[in-house]
Each structure stands twice: as C-alpha cells, then as structure tokens.
Image (cartoon, rainbow, N blue to C red):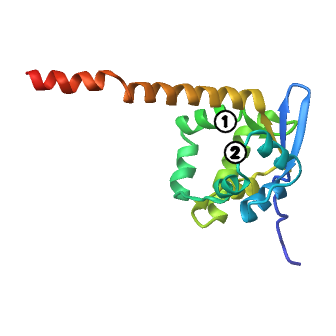
C-alpha cells in the first residue's frame, strides 16, 4: 500500500464580511486577474467601483517577494511574530472559525514560501491558505488602512515640513 497524505485545502473563496453583508470572490478570479489582467464577476465590479486598473491590480497579485523560509518561520514563532499574526488574524481568518486565524496565517506564509521556492506572492499565499474560505473583516481592514494612511500622512507632513526651508536660511546666517 502506498501512503499518501491528502492535499491540504487551499482557499477557494475570499469572503468579504461587514455585519450582515457577505460577498464571496473566488480565488480563481484572483488568479485570472494575476495571470491575464482580466477581472470577472464581483471582482470586476469591485475594481470598477474603486476605479482600479485590473492590469495594475493583477501585477500586484502576481508580484512575488523573496523571503528566507527558515528566518520567516522562526520570526513567526517569536513574541513579535505572534503579536503581528494576532493582529492580522483579526482581519483575515478562516470563515466560521476566527480563533484559528493565527495558525492559518502562519501555515499559509510558511507553505506559500516553501512551495514558491523562497518567494511569496498574494496568489501563492491564497493557494497555501489552509481553509477553503478565508474571511476578510472589512471594518477591521478599513480601520487598518485608515491607520496606515494616517501614519503615511504624518510622515509626509514632517518630511515636507515648511521648517525645512527655515533650516537652510538659519544655517546660512550662522
């Protein structure tokens, strides 16, 4: 008898959730967008609604980042890694089992990097996600994006500060 391990389920749908609102985007639609720059179904509607260019979004989905597997695995098992995963697991988690978010994210990252020969893309992350349906908590995601925008606005404010011009005048008078 040959022993084989059954393949772990990969994400088949990304379920966008906000209160009673639930809409699913098939991962196959994300893969099509990444490969050909073509959007279909709800994904096409979302891109059109948000004025996003499907070809550009497709490029982002297929873009891979080289990551050292052993280092990432070790980092994810530190207190800092656990804290990061815990925060992300409030946004992305297996549908109907939000308590399994941390192990699911850790698994998807490690398996995605391993199967990508040291590279990870959003599509390879989805292929490695160990649950058929991945829930995305839209209010939590929007709150995170708002914080990220606030931080980038704050950095931009200080980097484009009018005080920069004063420093040049001050240093010339000394």
Q: Nearer the viewer, residue 105 or 138?
A: 138
Quadrant in the picture for residue 15: top right
| Separation of residues labelled 1 and 2 (CA atoms) | 8 Å
Q: Is residue 58 above or below residue 92?
A: below
Q: Which image quadrant: the N terminus?
A: bottom right
> Residue 41: where, in percent of width, then height?
89, 51
Q: Quadrant of residue 98?
A: top right
Q: As rendered, which of 63 and 100 lies closer to the eye?
A: 63
Q: Quadrant of the C terminus?
A: top left
Give the mark nearest the N terminus, 1 or 2. Answer: 1
> Which numbered disc covers residue 105?
2
Q: Which mark is residue 16?
A: none
Image-based side of 140 in relation to 68, left or right: right
Out of 28 and 10, give the one closest to the viewer. 28
Q: Secondary structure at mark 1?
A: helix
Q: Is any part of residue 119 visible from this angle?
A: yes
Q: Could you say where residue 21 lies in the image, as x and y percent from the top left? A: 90, 30
Q: Residue at x 81, y 55 (%)?
A: 39
Q: How many marks?
A: 2
108 sits to left or right of 147: right
How crowded pointer 2 is (Cα within 10 Å; few <14, some 14-19, many 20+) is rated as many
Quarter-wise, where is residue 117 in the image? bottom right
Which residue appears farthest toward the left when viewing the image? 174
Say if mark 1 contacts mark 2, CB within 8 Å: yes
In the rendered view, tell whether residue 2 sits above or below residue 143: below
Q: Residues within 10 Å of mark 1 (few under 14, many from 20)?
A: some
Q: Which residue is mark 1?
A: 88
């Amino acid at each position: 008898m040959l022993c084989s391990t059954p393949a772990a389920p990969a994400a088949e749908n990304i379920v966008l959730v906000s209160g009673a609102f639930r809409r699913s985007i098939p991962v196959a639609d994300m893969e099509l967008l990444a490969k050909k720059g073509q959007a279909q179904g709800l994904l096409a509607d979302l891109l059109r609604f948000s004025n996003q260019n499907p070809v550009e979004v497709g490029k982002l989905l297929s873009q891979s980042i080289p990551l050292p597997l052993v280092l990432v695995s070790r980092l994810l098992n530190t207190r800092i890694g656990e804290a990061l995963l815990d925060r992300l697991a409030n946004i992305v988690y297996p549908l109907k089992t939000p308590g399994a978010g941390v192990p699911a994210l850790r698994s998807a990252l490690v398996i995605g990097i391993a199967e990508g020969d040291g590279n990870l893309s959003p599509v390879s992350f989805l292929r490695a996600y160990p649950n058929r349906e991945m829930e995305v908590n839209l209010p939590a995601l929007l709150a995170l994006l708002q914080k990220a925008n606030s931080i980038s606005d704050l950095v931009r404010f200080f980097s484009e500060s009018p005080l920069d011009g004063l420093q040049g005048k001050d240093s010339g008078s000394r």
